[in-house]
Amino acid sequence: MKPAAEFQRHLEERRQAADRLTRRAGRISAARLLAALAGVFAFWLAFVHHGASPLWLLLPIAAFACLARWHDRTLHALDAARRGARFYELALSRLDGTWPRQGETGAAFLDPHHAYAASLDLFGPASLFQFLNTARTQAGEQALAGFLLHPAGIEVAQARQEAVRDLAPRRALREDLFLLGEDVRAGLHPEALASWAGRPAALPGTALRAAAFVLPALTLAGLAFWAFQGSRILFLVSASLQALLFYQLRARVAEVLDSLAQPAHELALVAALLRRLERESFTSPLLATLHQRIASGAAREIHVLARLVEFASQARNAFFAPIAAILLWSLHFAWAIDAWRARHGASIAQWLQTLGEFEALNALAAFAAARPELPYPALASGPAHYQGEDLFHPLLPPHRAVPNSLSLSGAQPLLIISGSNMSGKSTMLRTVGVNAVLAFAGAPVCARSLALTPYALGASIRITDSLHEGSSRFFAEIKQLRLIAELARGPLPLLFLLDEILSGTNSHDRRIGAAAVLRSLLQFQAQGLVTTHDLALTRIAETVTPPGLNLHFEDHLEQGRIVFDYLIRPGVVAKSNALELMRSIGLDVAPE
């Protein structure tokens, strides 16, 4: 069964289950009302009319209690069915192109000075990150962002490929993880939690802790003595000593508790996610290694920490606060959390990192499962090359994507793509770049086939001026070109993607500057693509060594409308559509 049909079938099953459970919940609610009315009648019959034994009250009370429990279980199942439906709705949205309407955009990971992230739309609304991301924890989102921002070496990328292959068929696992985390995005910051875990013990040792147990017992005894014997000396002395102890330690207690008060719910979610992963067994060596890191009780210990934080927070309850003060409740739980940190603080960062890597690989596996026809790239060492057959962009719905093939190598390191506006030049650059990012993240690629070697990737596609920095678009572009030129001098061959190079200056300076930049890059054995609608720049292909290759996109008019086929062709484009495009939106550009 094709993924879309399978997702639709499961969606209908979850929706039907939700409908059944909604009706069942309604019937149970009605039955609870009848049980309550029966209880009122039994009470009247027993205590007002005196016509029956009070024991008859037990029947409606028991019935109401059983119905209440059944109702809770039904509502929980209903919530799970609705979440399950949401899981498959999101899966279908990634196939029909409606996915940009939901999900985390990853905008926080966007570094405007990164060599390619902004140009390839890796983060932000309608980005590759938003398309791929299924993580429910910040650790998972950070790991996925790291996969996209930092291409892995061949061995690591191939290990991730095996892991993605192992995870892709595990639809039930992905649904379970989604159901556990759908109601909350865990905001735990791995670095902050690791910093907390690495701090030294905040509270003193055994002597004062023993006093913290003895003094509340004496205070309670003093209260009893005061109530029954009328003497309050014991209570006043023990309560004063207890208050003095807490006053001396209050800052340390706050240090322990305040740092974990906010993420208590997130800790419970992390524990649930880890517990679900513990139940799996994996064949991939990478997944087996990750599983081994958490299989020694990570879920149990995180759950213990979550419960300690939850219990400690009860001291803020207005009704329980007086009792908590007498029992030194906050102090005892701060000690327990401090002891937990001493036992497991060194492990918590690794546990969160492991969960994050699982989630990142699971996000790539969801992509692979939804598009099983996509191949994994052939990653190789040796002379730099990029050979893609029928490449297309992953963010385009399959029915709209137009595949194109191209090849880069030492013998053909430069492709200059000309064409009219909106013909597909920029999309071609992003297609090449994004598929390289997917390849070294460990994911399938959008192509019939792709073979490539490791590259340092640099792109200048989405360049804008900056009012804040006081720089023009041209200045922003040449700064990006300088960054790309520095990458060319690095240990890896450079793959450059330059859109409308130096379009912010006059045509004379543009031709000279563009030729100089490209010769400089090719001097360091860089390879890449350049797009332009300035046909004068296409002659650069003849002036560099080895010679570049000219390709183009074209368009034609149909009934007064400009039509694009988005197919790349050899040679230089023969015409421009700028005037036709201006006329198509109503501008008067009649020839003089």
Image: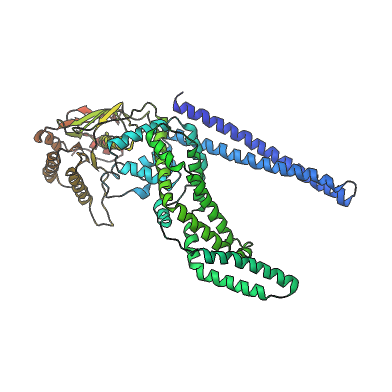
The answer to whether 518 appears left or right of 476 in the picture is left
Q: Residue drawn 57% across and 36% down?
A: 81
Q: Nearer the viewer, residue 199 or 76?
A: 199
The answer to whether 305 appears left or right of 32 in the picture is left
Question: Residue lying farthest front?
Answer: 207
Residue 253 makes an appearance in the image: yes
The answer to whether 432 appears left or right of 62 in the picture is left
Residue 556 makes an appearance in the image: no
Q: x%, y% of residue 122?
A: 33, 42
Q: Nearer the viewer, residue 84 or 353?
A: 353
Q: x%, y% of residue 345?
A: 44, 53
Q: Nearer the viewer, residue 550 or 134?
A: 134
Q: Residue drawn 40% across and 34% down?
A: 365
Q: Residue drawn 47% across and 32% down?
A: 171
Q: Is residue 269 above or below residue 549?
A: below
> Number of labelled discs?
0
Q: x%, y% of residue 194?
A: 41, 53
Q: Is residue 2 above or below residue 470?
A: above
Q: x%, y% of residue 52?
A: 88, 46
Colour scheme: rainbow
Quadrant where the C terminus lies? top left
